[in-house]
Image (cartoon, helix red, strand yellow):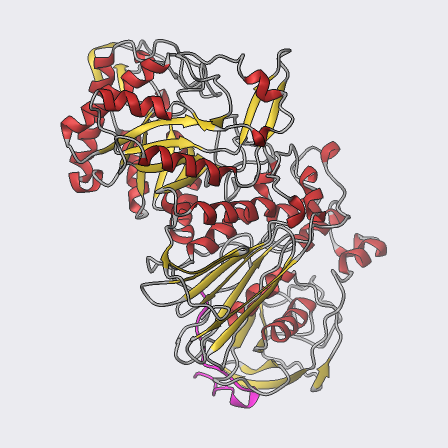
Amino acid sequence: MIDALSPSDAPLRHVWNECVGAGRANEALRADWQAQFREAVEVLGARYVRFHGLFHDDMFVYRTENGGGFGASGQLPTPVYTFAYVDKVFDAILDTGARPFVELGFMPRQLATQTETLFWWKAHCSPPRNMDDWVALVTATALHWIERYGIDEVRQWRFEVWNEPNLVPKFWTGTRTEYFELYAATARALKSIDAQLLVGGPATSVFVPDARYAGEYYDPSPEVATAVAEDPDALDWQPVWIREFIAYCAERDLPLDFLSTHLYPTDYAADSLGKVSAITRHKDATYEDLLVMRQIIQDSPYPHAELHISEWSTSPSSRDAIHDTVFAASYIVRAFLKGAALADSISYWTFTDVFEEGGGGIGPFHGGFGFVNENGLHKPTFHAMAMLNRLGDRVLAELDDGVITRSSVNGEVSAVFYNYPADMGRAGLVAQNSYVETRFLAEVGPSRRVQHVIRGLTPGDRFAVDILDGNHGNVAEAWYRLGAPSTSPANRPPICGRSPTNSTIASSSSTQTAHSRLTSSLLPGRSCRSRSHRDPLLADNGRSAPVTRRFVPELEARRHLIEGYADHPSMPQSVVDRWKAPFGPAEEWDLSITDVELPGPHGPVPVRVYTPPGPVPEGGRACLIWMHGGAFVWGNLDMAEAHEVARGVAGRADAVVISVHYRRCPVPPSSTEPSTGESTNSGNRFVSPCRKTTARPFSMTSAATRHVSASTRRASPSEGRAPAPRSLPARPCARPVPVEPLADASRLPAPAP
C-alpha cells in the first residue's frame, strides 16, 4: 500500500538509457571517450549509442587514393573500403555490453555533390553523385559487420538513414524528395542483405508551428509569424516531414521498422527583417510532441513501427550553460518520467562533452551537452541519470512529484522525486550563455516537502536516500565558487557570493516496522531518489563502479594564497592565517577519543580510537581502520589531516574510527617537524591523555564526508555487504571493503603476527 492506496503495477520503460548520443565517430577513437562511455554503460545503464560521421573522411572508409603523405597520392583503379577505424570504434562499444545505433552518414568526399557544408571538421552533407555508389558502400559496410560480429548481433542494431535532412543547406543540400530517394535505396539495400535488419528515419529536427518545411526546400517566409507570435506555446506545433515520409514509404511499399525524429523543445525563427528569435517552449512540450508522434504512428500504415527520439536535450546548443546545472537535472528527470510510456527510446544528446561540432569547448564547464565534462567530472545530469537507472521496471505509484517503483527481478522498491519549482509555471529552461547567468534560477521556489507512506515492506528493510541539488553533486557550482579557473581572468566571477540552494547527499537506514515513511524537503531544482538496497554496489549487469578521483574545492580555492612562496617560513603570517582558517562552522560530536598502543613488529604502535556516543546499533557499528604514512618524514595523530578528519568521519558516519600512527621515513638532517604533539619515528611512542572532544573546527567538504560516511556504514547482517556511497562526488567512489562490526574499542581484534 502506498499512501493507503493499492499500487498500480504498470510497466516502466527505461527510455532514458536505451540510447545516448555522441558527437562523431572519430571522437570515439579517443581513450577518454571510450572510458566515459563505459562508465555510461556501467553506471547509467546505456544500451545503445548514436553518433554522426560514420562515413566521414577522417574514418577513411571510402578510399579512391592510396594516401601518399609527402609523396604523390596514387589513384586506385577502383574504390576500396577500409574499416580499420570503424572496427576500433564498434569493438570498443560492443566490449562494454552496449550496441551501436547506426546513423548512416555523412557522404564521403568522393561521393558528395557538395562538400564541407557543416562543422569545423567539414562534413559533406549532400546527396551522392551516384546512388549506386552509395548503395554499394552501405552494402559493403553491413556485410562487413555481419562477417565480423555475426548476423544475430547485427539484427539487434538500428540503421537510421542520415541526420536532420530538413536542415538545408547544413545537414542536407538536396530536396526533400532526394532524401526520400536516399532512404528508399538504403532501406532496400539493407533488406536485400537480411530481411530482419531494422531500418528507419527520417531523423528530422524539431517540431515547428508553420509551413517552412512543407515544400521540397526550406522556405523561411512562413516562420515570420512564429518569430513575432505573442505566445508561441499557443501555436500548433507539428513534426517535420513525418507524415510525408510515411506516405512516401507506404506508396512504394518500403520497409519502415521505426520512425525517428528530434524533439528539442526549442525553435529559432526569423522575422521579416531577419532578426532571429530563440524560442523556448513550455515544460511539457516534449510530452505533447510524443503524444502527437504516437498518434501519427497509430493511424499510419505502419502502426507497429518503433518510435526513437534519436536526439533530445533542453536545447540544441553545445554552449548552453543550463546543461551544466542542477536545473537541467530536475527538468530531464521530469520529462523522461512523463514520456516513458510513449517512445521506445529518448536519446539524450550527448553523454559526454568530448564533442567537437563547434570545436573543443573553452574551459571545463562551457555549456556542453554531456553528463560528464571533458575531464570526466560528473555534472548534475549524470547523477540524475544514475538515479533513473536504478528505478525498477514496475510503477507502484505515479505521482505529481515523481514515481515509486518496484523491480520485477528482485522486488526492490525505489523512487525518484523532483522539484521543478511551482513558480516556474509552465516555463521551460531558457538557454544561457554562461554559468553565472543560470544562478538566478536558484531563487525560484518554493521548496517542496515530499512525504509518502509505503506499507507491506519486510521489517528491517533499509533504504538509501540520495539527494541532488545546488550544494552537492553540483561540480559546476564548486568550479564557479573557485573563480571559474582556466577561463580568462577578466571573465572570472568572484569566489565569494551566495551559492544556489540546491544540493546535498545522504545515506540513511530504516525501519524496524513493516512500513516506511519516505520524507524529503526538496529545494528548487532538486531531485531525490530512494530505494531499498540489497547489493547497491553492483549495477544491474553485476559490474562494480570504477575507481575514481576526488575533487576537493576548499583547498583548491585557497591554492592561490601560497603561490610564489618556496616554503612556510617565507610566508607572511596573514597568508598562513588565511590558509589555516576553518572552512566553515565547527561541528560538535560527543565522541570518546582514546589513545592506546598495540604491539608491532618494530615496537609499540600508537593508535587513536574514535567511538561515537549512544547505544550500539543492532548488528554493531561500522569500523574504519586508517593507516597513515609510509613515506612521510613527519606526521602525528594530532595533525588536522589525521585528527579532524577521523573525528568528522566518526561523528558523521556513526562509525568507530581507528587512526594508526604515522609510519615515517628517517628524518633528513635538515628537516624539521611541526611542534604540535610529541612524535618521533615509528619505534618511539606518542602519548596523549584520554579525553572527549566537542568542538574542533572540521575542514572536510560536506560531499566528501558524506561519501566516507556511506562507505563505512555497515549493512544489515542479512545483506552481507556494505551499502554503496551515497554522496555525489565528482565521480563515483571505489568499492568499500566490508568489515566486521565493532561496538567499541574493547572489541579491537588482536594484532596480526
Q: Quadrant of the image for the N terminus? A: bottom left
Residue found 43% across the figure and 73% down from its top? 738
Residue 677, quarter of picture: bottom right
Residue 660, x across and y down, in percent: 57, 76
Which sits in the foreground, 115 or 5? 5
Q: Main secondary structure of the magenta part?
A: loop
Q: Quadrant of the image for the C terminus? A: bottom left
Left or right: 497 as drawn, with respect to 93: right
Left or right: 118 as drawn, with respect to 591: left
- Residue sticking out furthest to the bottom: 746
Residue 275, quarter of picture: top right
Residue 449, x across and y down, in percent: 63, 62
- Is residue 750 a member of the stretch shown in magenta? yes
Residue 9, quarter of picture: bottom left
Start-end of magenta stretch: 735-753
Q: Is residue 550 above or below residue 120?
A: below
What count of labels does the image hold? 0
Residue 350, x across and y down, in percent: 46, 38
Left or right: 725 as drawn, with respect to 675: left
